[in-house]
Amino acid sequence: MSKPFFTLPRLGRRGKILRNLTLSLCFLALVWAALEFPLPAVPAFHRLERSYLRQPSQVIAQLRQEDGVYVVGVSQEDAVVGDMDYPTLSAWPLSQDGASLMPIPTRKVAPETVFFLSLNTPQDAVTARLELELSAWLIDIGPDTDVPVLELPNAEDSGRYRQEFRQYQAQGQRLDSGAFLFPVRAAAPGDAADGAGERRTLSALVDWYTYTAARPGRENNPDFLITAHFYDANGRQIGQAVLSPQEGNPFCPSQP
């Protein structure tokens, strides 16, 4: 019987471990390439900033919502929110008058939880609490009139509209950056009769169009007042931030 022209060397235990490790790394590289080389959230966020011709900002928050991961960074001029699952970048103006609040947008139409983030947070703040009061007009539409939408009532059909008043409180989650993240959760269960209307109203609070359309002294829908209180280690209040349509348009403060 003729001898084989070429034979592979017999591998010892260490050689088999190295071989299996090499094959595993090659497989992971193929999977990563098939997924178009996704990066971790923060490097991906900075790459998204570069695609918008922006300089890298200082990342102050990273959170997962019902519809994906969001990253927030701040620069000297504004704060930017990156939607990492549907890569887009949005800028929110920074207040020049101390601490402020920014709503974290979501693509979810009726989320169970919405988030607000503090900006220019007082340096000595150790704890924080958020209070929210709102009123909203809703009307049910659709074939079975079971889809609530936000709409101001008109005189011709005012009987179909209803006004809801709600109050919420949220304890701030202090992040490593010193900012506070405030989760506001719907009070009614998702399958409750009034749950859909409540969640759609909460969604409007983090929809930035609500703020660009805000007009002080006029009827806004929803109308709300969000106040964050900041406390030091001794429990003394050292600052607060307010977010409300009655405060005007944060994107254009001079607009009446």
Image (spheres, helix red, strand yellow):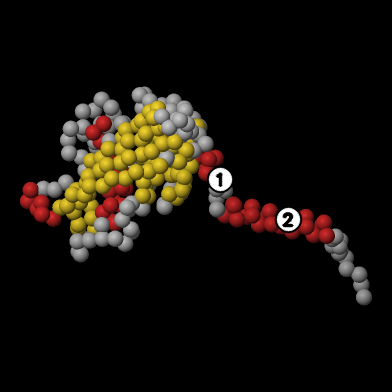
Q: Is residue 195 visible?
A: yes
What SS does tag 2 mark? helix
60 left or right of 94?
Answer: right
The residue beneath circle 1 is 39
**In the image, what residue type sits under mark 2?**
Leu
Q: Nearer the viewer, residue 138 or 45?
A: 138
Q: Quadrant of residue 208?
A: top left
x and y, in percent, of residue 105 in the image: 37, 43
> At 36% from the left edge and 53% from the top edge, which residue is drawn?
112
> At 17% from the left edge and 35% from the top edge, which residue is drawn?
218
7 left or right of 239?
Answer: right
What SS does tag 1 mark? loop
Q: Nearer the viewer, residue 44 or 145?
A: 145
The residue beneath circle 2 is 21
Q: Nearer the viewer, residue 179 or 1?
A: 179
x and y, in percent, of residue 256 in the image: 21, 28
x and y, in percent, of residue 163 in the image: 18, 49
95 left or right of 49?
Answer: left
> At 25% from the left edge and 25% from the top edge, which residue is drawn?
254
> At 24% from the left edge and 28% from the top edge, which residue is drawn?
255
Q: Residue furthest left?
A: 156
**In the image, what residue type sits under mark 1?**
Leu
Label ID, residue 101? none
x and y, in percent, of residue 75 in the image: 45, 29
**Residue 150, above or below 146:** above
Q: Is residue 72 visible?
A: no
Query: Separation of disc 1 and disc 2 at Cα?
Result: 22 Å
Q: Quadrant of residue 10?
A: bottom right
Q: Quadrant of residue 189?
A: bottom left
